[in-house]
Image (cartoon, rainbow, N blue to C red):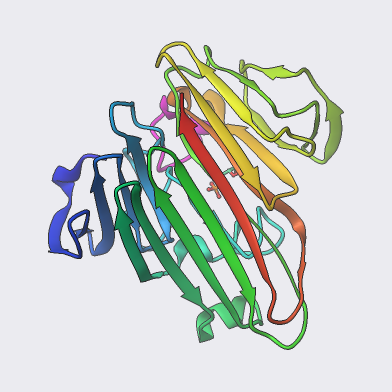
């Protein structure tokens, strides 16, 4: 991200500074292993760049930092549901203000933990108490863990996604493997090829992905490796040209340099017993 657009507020440590953009507080992390930015609005990672490598994450230059709408790009946190299981679409976590609850650093990198608890506002949308943490480990790889805790005395059903927008050279050139062959698209179950390339909109939930998903990106001369856990599906999304022009906070040609590969719990399929936790994770490395 272009840090010129941010105003520095204060330093929390050698490697973490707090900045502000349009009233939204952002943590800017610079470490010998990597740099990253994380917004407290949405608990949202905006960028991650391992040292000596190109930016991993795609962020829309038209993203709306007013604090009223979800941020387009980065890693939006969809929670406590994915998609239109209820309203608002993708849940309320991505438009909530998270608090910084912990940060630590050593020679390997920086760890940041943000937290979210229920409020009167969230209970009006979803009538449960909860505690959610998102832990970002910024090292030469990026690890993100979304930890949901049921603080009620009844079981609750949760879903969600780490809706990662990856930065790619050109959507027409990439090839993705490791997604498996089985997917659901527009409500239909289908079987596809082992390797996916793009020539139109794709919005699928893969239900049998392998441990490692690989993106071959010849224009950026790299491979991205994504390993997800705690999920029951991997969402693959690129809106392509027509939908891109309909998405207000995305440049018309934005679809050419992004692809979403998401660690997803669809259908609110995690039943959390009282006092129990669930961890949804994604780990992204640039090879
Ligand atoms: O994860 C894919 C998806 O659910 C698509 O269907 C598409 O709508 C996308 O997310 C973006 O959703 P948003 O609400 O952020 O515009």
Q: Relative to residue 71, is residue 61 depicted above or below?
A: above
The residue sitting at 43% across, 61% down in the picture is 42
Q: Is 279 placed left or right of 39 in the picture?
A: right
Q: Considering depth in this image, is 72 or 32 the residue closer to the camera?
A: 32
Identify whether 81 is placed above or below 75.
below
Of residue 140 and residue 6, the one placed in the foreground of this image is 140
**Residue 70 visible to the viewer:** no
How many numbered markers are drawn? 0
Query: Is 164 included in the stretch rendered in magenta?
Result: no
Q: Report ligand 1 position as a quadrant.
A: top right
Residue 174, how many percent across, how many down? 54, 16
Q: Is residue 246 left or right of residue 16?
A: right
User: Looking at the image, which residue sits at the far front?
Assistant: 107
The x, y position of residue 94, in whole percent, is 49, 60
Magenta residues span: 243-254
Camera sees residue 225: yes
Compared to 184, does 256 lie above or below?
above
In which quadrant of the rendered view does residue 78 lie?
A: bottom right
Q: Is residue 283 left or right of residue 184?
A: left
What residue do we see at 33% from left, 62% from top? 104
Q: Residue at x 43, y 54 (%)?
A: 136
Q: Position of residue 82 (x, y in %)?
A: 66, 55
> Which residue is pictured at 80% across the width and 21% down the height?
192
Q: Is residue 119 left or right of residue 80?
A: left
Q: Is residue 199 above or below residue 212?
A: above
- Residue 54, quarter of picture: top left
- Quadrant in which the N terminus is drawn: top left
Image coords of residue 199 (percent x, y): 61, 15
Q: Is residue 251 magenta?
A: yes
């Amino acid at each position: 991200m272009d840090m010129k657009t941010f105003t520095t507020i204060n330093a929390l440590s050698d490697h973490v500074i707090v900045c502000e953009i349009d009233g939204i507080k952002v943590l800017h992390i610079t470490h010998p292993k990597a740099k990253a930015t994380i917004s407290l609005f949405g608990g949202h990672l905006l960028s991650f760049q391992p040292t000596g490598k190109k930016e991993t994450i795609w962020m829309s230059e038209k993203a709306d930092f007013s604090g009223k709408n979800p941020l387009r790009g980065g890693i939006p946190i969809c929670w406590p549901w994915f998609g239109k299981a209820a309203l608002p679409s993708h849940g309320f976590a991505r438009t909530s203000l998270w608090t910084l609850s912990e940060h630590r650093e050593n020679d390997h990198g920086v760890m940041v933990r943000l937290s979210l608890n229920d409020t009167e506002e969230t209970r009006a949308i979803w009538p449960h108490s909860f505690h959610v943490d998102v832990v970002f480990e910024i090292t030469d790889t990026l690890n993100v863990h979304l930890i949901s805790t049921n603080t009620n005395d009844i079981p609750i059903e949760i879903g969600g996604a780490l809706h990662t927008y990856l930065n790619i050279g050109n959507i027409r050139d990439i090839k993705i493997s490791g997604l498996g062959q089985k997917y659901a698209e527009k409500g239909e179950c289908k079987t596809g090829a082992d390797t996916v390339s793009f020539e139109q909109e794709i919005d699928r939930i893969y239900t049998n992905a392998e441990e490692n998903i690989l993106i071959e990106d010849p224009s950026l001369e790299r491979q991205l490796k994504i390993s997800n856990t705690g999920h029951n599906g991997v969402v693959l999304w690129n809106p392509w040209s027509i939908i891109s022009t309909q998405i207000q906070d995305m440049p018309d040609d934005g679809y050419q340099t992004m692809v979403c590969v998401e660690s997803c719990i669809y259908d609110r399929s995690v039943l959390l017993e009282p006092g129990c936790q669930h961890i949804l994770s994604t780990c992204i490395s640039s090879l």
